[in-house]
Each structure stands twice: as structure tokens, then as C-alpha cells.
Amino acid sequence: MSRRNDRMKASDVFREKEFIFTRKVSFDEAFPEIEKIVIEVEERGDGVNLSGFCDSRRIYKNPNLPGEYIDCSNPLCYSGGVRIGSIIHEMVRARSTERVGSTSFCQGYEGSPKGRRRYRKCTNSFKVKVSITYKEKAFTKTSN
Ligand SMILES: [Zn+2]
């Protein structure tokens, strides 16, 4: 799949680097205890939308989830995005149902299309909110 600017985003780099090491599993296989998940991402910065507004909100629900990373919208950014896979893993381990993350900056950088030269760090930022509903039988006890 070719992109408008040919710069790979975090999910592309992740796919390319880790595909050979880890077997990709579906979301349900990875998190069988999750009934429902809603991921709300607020991104600010360059390229967020083309009509000139400087922030946007994206909402993802299972089964249509973005995968390990939410990609950055900055067209100059290489390997950009924010990792949500680890956030979900942490939440599931702690059985948390709601997490409002602090704003975190994009992990990518602005550089040449193949990413060999770095010009500056990407300044786009993401705020991630996650709500999880667990399957009943996964609970050892329920509140009601
Ligand atoms: Zn970025």
C-alpha cells in the first residue's frame, strides 16, 4: 500500500520490523477477556485534518481497532504515532475499566522520506482515553 508521501508510520515500521518475530494474533485472541473497548484519540498538530483545524478526535471500537499503534497525521513525520497496545495490556492486567492518559508526544521525527535523515522531532501530540468492558465470566466477583 503506498501512501501520499511514502513515509512509513509507526504501525508500518512495527509491522515490517516485528512481523518476522511475532505471530500476529487478532484482538480477540490477544484479549479474550474484553467484551467491549472504546479508544478515543485526540491528536493535535500538523496534518491532523486538511480543512485547517488543528485538532481532531478519532474513536475506535472493537472489532475495528487500529492495532498496536495509532498513526501520526503529520505528513512529514517518519515512524510516527503513539503505542496503544501496551496501554491496553497494562489496563487488562490491572483490570482497569477506564484510563484517561496524559498528553504524550509522537514518537516519530520529521525526516527524509525513507527516514534516513532526521530534521527534527515530531511535535504532534496525542491524548488517549480507553474504556474497557470485561466479559462477565472473567470476573471473580461482581459488584452487584
Ligand atoms: Zn508524528
Image (spheres, rainbow, N blue to C red):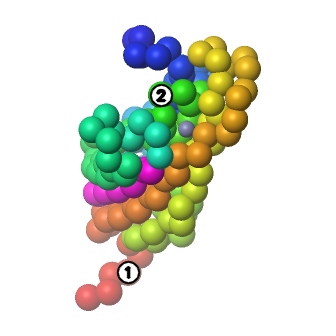
| Identity, as a three-letter code, of the amino acid under mark 2 | Pro
Above or below 71: residue 123: below
Give whichever of discs 1 and 2 has the lower sequence position: 2
Write the start and end of the magenta stretch as one range.
Answer: 35-44
For this orientation, the residue located farthest to the top is: 2
User: Residue at image x 40%, y 16%?
Assistant: 4
How many C-alpha atoms fall within 10 Å of the one at disc 1: few (<14), some, or many (≥20)?
Answer: few
Question: Which type of secondary structure does the marked residue at label 2 adopt?
Answer: loop
Q: Which residue is mark 2?
A: 75
| Ligand 1 found in image quarter | top right
Q: Main secondary structure of the magenta part?
A: strand
Vertical placement of residue 110 versus 134, above or below: above
Where is residue 105 drawn, in percent x and y?
59, 51
- Viewed as shown, does residue 75 lie left or right of 62? right
| Dot label at residue 141 | 1
- Position above or below: 108 against 96: above
What residue lies at 59% left-to-right and 46% top-to-bottom? 123
Nearer the camera: disc 1 or disc 2: 2
**Is the N terminus in the top left, top right, bottom left or bottom right quadrant?**
top left
Q: Reply yes or no: does residue 42 show up in magenta.
A: yes
User: As rendered, which of 79 and 137 lies closer to the eye?
Assistant: 79
Q: For the residues marked 1 and 2, what is the alpha-carbon distance in whole angstroms?
A: 48 Å
**Which residue shows up at 65% across the image and 34% down it?**
109
x 32%, y 52%: residue: 57
Is residue 31 found inside the magenta-colored segment of the image? no
